[in-house]
């Protein structure tokens, strides 16, 4: 069996960011608004801090205005809600992202529910979740939308294909399944209680792994020629003592021998998330200003 094609998420993400930047430039040249993206981080988790700084850097590179709110770990729920309320009312802010997870003393759903659905670039607000399910104009979660973009680039139409989504989180699994359904795929959602996970997987033309279990999906779970999208980002001990490395939810070395195409970790789905966030901020800005929004890539 020949090796799978390795899907270059860095390259697709760079194309998407460039396309967003061109649209932002055209919008500004026509006297339109400058899209503004606000990112809120509560606490000092180093990985989240790096991630949020990266988001801001990419937003500025695309010609957007970036607003950073780094709040201390002891920020109260009421304080966070008042920050969100100010951003909701600020006409220069078109997109609001509150980085998850939040500290335990804050009710995440309450905070998500408080974001203006028109500015909810994560697509986590129940209004956007409902619109995704019912087929309305929704802002859609970034990681799943990035996965669908990679799949459509690779496969063209997804219509009629069998897809399995491993994982049922609100951030990835559930919206992923809805997006695949919107593309007319035949969708199975599998999870920790699923009987015969390997057998279910082997039936699928498309495998989306989003379980957070390092290298759980083995090579013999994959139908020969299937397309494998690995959403997992797991830090595990590396080859040398004291070193760590990133691995996905798929055993890449095994799966690459069987799949038709596969995303690596890192360099697959990861870079797409921020690129789609910028796309969503552009969409939110256009819709808030009654301007047409056409798909970017
Ligand atoms: N934490 C991990 N992924 C995400 C995401 O897509 N959005 C937000 N807000 N927080 C996250």
Image: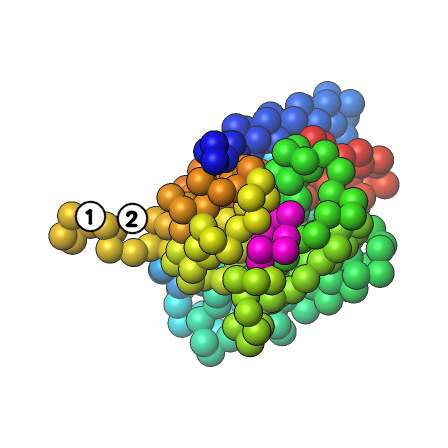
Q: How many marks?
A: 2
What residue appears at the point 16 percent right and 48 percent down from the top-left corner?
Answer: 240
Q: How was the colour assigned to the protein in this rendering?
A: rainbow
User: For residue 245, which numbered disc appears in the image?
Assistant: 2
Residue at 40% x, 51% y is 251
Can residue 60 be seen here? no
- Residue 76 in view of the camera: yes
The residues tagged by marks 2 and 1 sit, at their Cα atoms, a distance apart of 8 Å
Q: Report x, y in % for residue 119.
A: 70, 53
**Quadrant in the rendering for residue 59:** top right
Ligand 1 closer than 8 Å to label 2 CB: no
Which class describes the residues within 10 Å of circle 2: few (<14), some (14-19), or many (20+)? some
Residue with the most extreme left position: 241
- Residue at image coords 55%, 69%: 196
Q: Is mark 2 on a helix, strand or loop?
A: strand
Q: Between residue 127 and residue 78, name the one nearer to us.
A: 127
In reply to whether residue 158 is colored magenta, the answer given is no
Label 1 residue SS: loop
Magenta residues (range): 201-207
Q: Report x, y in % for residue 81.
A: 59, 69
Q: Residue 239 carries which label?
A: 1
Marked residue nearer the N-terminal end (2 or 1): 1
In the figure, 28 relative to 56: above or below? above
135, above or below 106, in the image:
above
- Determine the image quadrant of residue 187: bottom right
**Residue 247, position in %: x, y?**
37, 50
In the rendered image, which quarter contains the C terminus? Answer: top right
Ligand 1 within 8 Å of disc 1? The answer is no
Q: Nearer the viewer, mark 2 or mark 1?
A: 1
Residue 15 image label: none
């Amino acid at each position: 069996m020949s090796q799978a094609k390795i899907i270059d998420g860095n390259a697709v993400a760079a194309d998407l960011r460039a396309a967003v930047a061109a649209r932002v430039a055209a919008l500004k040249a026509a006297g339109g608004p400058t899209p503004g993206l606000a990112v809120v981080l509560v606490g000092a988790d180093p990985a989240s801090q790096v991630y949020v700084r990266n988001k801001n850097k990419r937003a500025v590179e695309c010609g957007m205005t970036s607003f950073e709110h780094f709040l201390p770990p002891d920020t109260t729920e009421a304080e966070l809600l008042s920050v969100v309320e100010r951003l909701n009312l600020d006409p220069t802010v078109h997109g609001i992202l509150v980085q998850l997870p939040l500290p335990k003393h804050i009710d995440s759903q309450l905070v998500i529910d408080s974001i203006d659905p028109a500015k909810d670039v994560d697509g986590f607000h129940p209004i956007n979740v409902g619109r995704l399910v019912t087929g309305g104009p929704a802002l859609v979660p970034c990681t799943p939308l990035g996965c669908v973009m990679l799949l459509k680039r690779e496969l063209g139409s997804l219509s009629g294909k069998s897809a399995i989504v491993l994982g049922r989180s609100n951030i990835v699994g559930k919206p992923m399944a809805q997006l695949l359904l919107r593309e007319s795929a035949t969708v199975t959602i599998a999870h920790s209680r699923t009987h015969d996970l390997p057998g279910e997987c082997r039936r699928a033309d498309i495998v989306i792994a989003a379980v957070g279990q390092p290298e759980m999906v083995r090579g013999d779970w994959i139908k020969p020629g299937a397309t494998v999208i690995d959403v997992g980002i797991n830090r595990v001990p590396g080859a040398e003592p004291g070193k760590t490395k990133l691995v996905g939810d798929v055993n890449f070395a095994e799966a690459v021998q069987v799949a038709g195409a596969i995303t690596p970790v890192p360099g697959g789905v990861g870079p797409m998330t921020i690129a789609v966030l910028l796309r969503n901020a552009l969409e939110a800005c256009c819709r808030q200003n009654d301007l047409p929004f056409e798909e970017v890539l």
